[in-house]
Image (cartoon, grey):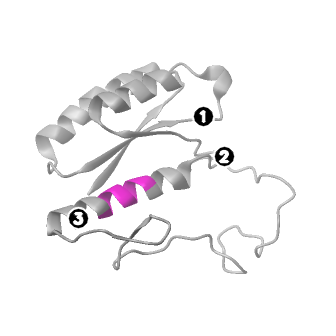
Amino acid sequence: MGVLLIYDMTDPKSFKNVDYWVRNLDEHADKTVQKLLVGNKADMAAKRKVSTEEGQALADKYGMTFFETSAKSGLNVEQAFRAIAERVCDSYDLLSGIPPRTHNNGSVANSNAVKLSERRGNGGAGGNGGAAASGPEKRKCC
């Protein structure tokens, strides 16, 4: 199992809640749960209240990987989900005793892995048929 602990970089109160969330996970979740810390709203630099260094220090304190993302622009969102998925798969392999196999480039292969990729063609959600866009599409969050 994997958990993304996401705080709002413009709201110090949400950052302070991370300690509480981690304690709850430690008390109630399986000990093998994989955790990843995410600071969201990276697109709002002028309103930032929690520094990158503070986020990284908290992630280090709990042994978590750290990402700063923007749900609005999509910055690092896919990378964060890939990172937690890889950690979950790796933990299952370790628990089941399956040794990780590697590709020639050193990356880990998993026979049960699903490759994530962008949807191309006419079926893409909000897509443009794979054509290059003239600029980033403005989307509302939530």
- Asked if disc 1 and disc 2 are in contact, CB closer than 8 Å, the reply is yes
SS of the residue under disc 1: loop
User: Which image quadrant: the N terminus?
Assistant: bottom left
Within 10 Å of disc 1 (Cα), the crowding (few <14, some 14-19, many 20+) is many
Q: What residue is pinned by disc 3?
A: 92
For disc 2, the marked residue is: 73
Seen in the picture, residue 66 relative to 47 is either above or below; the reply is: below
Q: Is 86 in front, or is 39?
A: 86
| Whole-percent x, y for residue 16 in the image | 35, 22
Q: Which residues are magenta?
A: 83-89
Q: Residue at x 57, y 71 (%)?
A: 117
What is the three-letter code of the residue carrying label 2?
Answer: Ser
- Amino acid at circle 1: Ala
CB under 8 Å between callouts 3 and 1? no
Q: Residue 22's spot in the image, x, y percent?
A: 25, 35
Does residue 4 sit above or below 7 in this rendering?
Answer: below
At label 3, counting other C-alpha atoms closer than 10 Å, the crowd grade (few under 14, some 14-19, many 20 or more) is some
Within the image, what quadrant is residue 63 found in? top left
Tell which circle, 3 or 2, labels the residue nearer the N-terminal end: 2
Magenta region, mostly helix, strand or loop?
A: helix
Label 3 sits on what residue type?
A: Tyr
Q: Which residue is mark 1?
A: 42
**Up-down relation of residue 11 to residue 27 (above or below):** above
Q: Of tags 3 and 1, which is closer to the observer?
A: 3
Q: Which residue extends farthest right?
A: 134
Residue 25 position, x and y percent, is 20, 41
Q: Tell me, for residue 82, which label it has, or none.
A: none
